[in-house]
Amino acid sequence: MSTDKPNSIWTPAFALLCLAQFLGYAQYFMLQPTFPLYVTSLGGTPFEVGIVLSCFAVTSVLFRPFIGCWADRWSESGVLISGLIVLAASMLLCFVPVVGTTMLANGIRGIGWAGLNTGGYSLLALSAPPSRRGEASGYYSGVQSGPTILLPAVALWIIDAPFGGFRGVFAFAILLAATGAAVGVLLARSGLRGHRDAPPEVSTSWWREIFDIMERDIILASVLLFCLHVALPAVASFVVLYAREIGVPNIGWFYIVSGATSVLARPLLGRVSGQIGRSESLVAGFIMQTIALGMLALATNLAWLLISGALFMAGTAIGTATTLALAVERAQPERRGRAMATFSVAFPLSGGVGALISGSMVELVGYFWMYLIVAALGAIGLVLTAMNWSRLNSAESRV
């Protein structure tokens, strides 16, 4: 299929995979500040904002087992393409200005998100050289976070533009996902796919096979990833409402600075995580996140928000690269789709739980206590890292 060197990361297939992920995540990050503003413009409350964001998480979580099994039985690239098509089609419902319809659209979008990530992580496991998985994971997660530099700010600009508004954002979101699907077709033609020399086992009922995805080492990586991302809705989505609450203008700069930090940090810190150890990397990530959330609770101006956002994203960068490398290492080739579905479920699950908690706490106790509460939830990851310290580092030594 390819004449690339065995340890080469940037093969044509890997480049196409990263481009497809970039476009899919571009849609996601463009909608992060859009949905809170859109729902409140329709008369919704912060709690309803949390419900809309959680609808995305619910379907993404529920459909992961099915999609993971589908990837193993059919095609990893086919699952990725299908996910991007669903992401594009779901946005058509957002043109109906009703909160309930927005919930439905975000729920359908969650199914597409499950396909994008399950197919993408499975293809990453296929394309990453074993000796450079930490570095490849850093590049991959860096590409995924790349759109955070400009896309949220672009969305805010389109919303305020006389020719744009929310409909302009939704139309652009459709274009991004549709283009990603086209890139996915090129990726499928590159020949990158899993090994299916033998037919699937028939001794196990199909429905048992679908739900038989819980592998111990993958679950550990997934739980740690959940702890890393449970505060993300409070930082990435509710910050636009928080800035309005405390009277801070030009919040688009928050997304530019935090996004740039994430993109620059992920490849670098992905490499560092393989040098200083998995446990040490996770501890550093959780500590940076906790400090950043405490700073957000005390923020009174844009500069304070920018520093907090950059610190939070740096912690997220090193933690995400570490957990992704751990999951890729532990995934069995014949069950790669289901294993990566187990891992990637942490993204939407943490987003849904985090959105519900954030929205509820804003209405009950305000933004100050909301940020402190999500900081405490994320700090649980420190305890889990300490409890599995030797296990995390021993997994790295086996590579």
Image: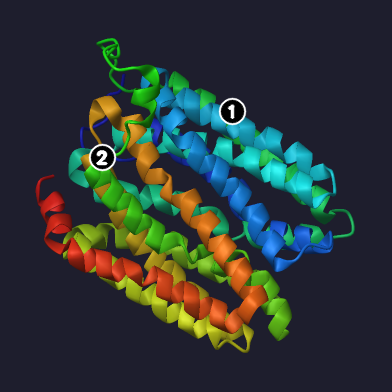
Please report the residue visible at 20 percent of the width from the left and 57 percent of the height from the top: 274
Which image quarter is the C terminus in? top left
Callout 2 crowding tier (Cα within 10 Å): few <14, some 14–19, many ≥20: some
What amino acid is at disc 1? Ala
Which image quarter is the N terminus in? top left
Please report the residue visible at 14 percent of the width from the left and 58 percent of the height from the top: 393
Q: Secondary structure at mark 2?
A: loop
Q: Secondary structure at mark 1?
A: helix
Dot 1 corresponds to which residue?
A: 182
Q: CA distance from mark 1 to mark 2?
A: 33 Å
Q: Quick one: 309 or 260, which is closer to the camera?
A: 309
The answer to whether 224 is drawn above or below residue 27 in the figure is: below
In primary-sequence order, the first of circles 1 and 2 is 1
Residue 329 in picture, x, y percent from top left: 22, 42
Task: Tell me, yes or no, if residue 325 can be seen here.
Answer: no
Dot 2 corresponds to which residue?
A: 215
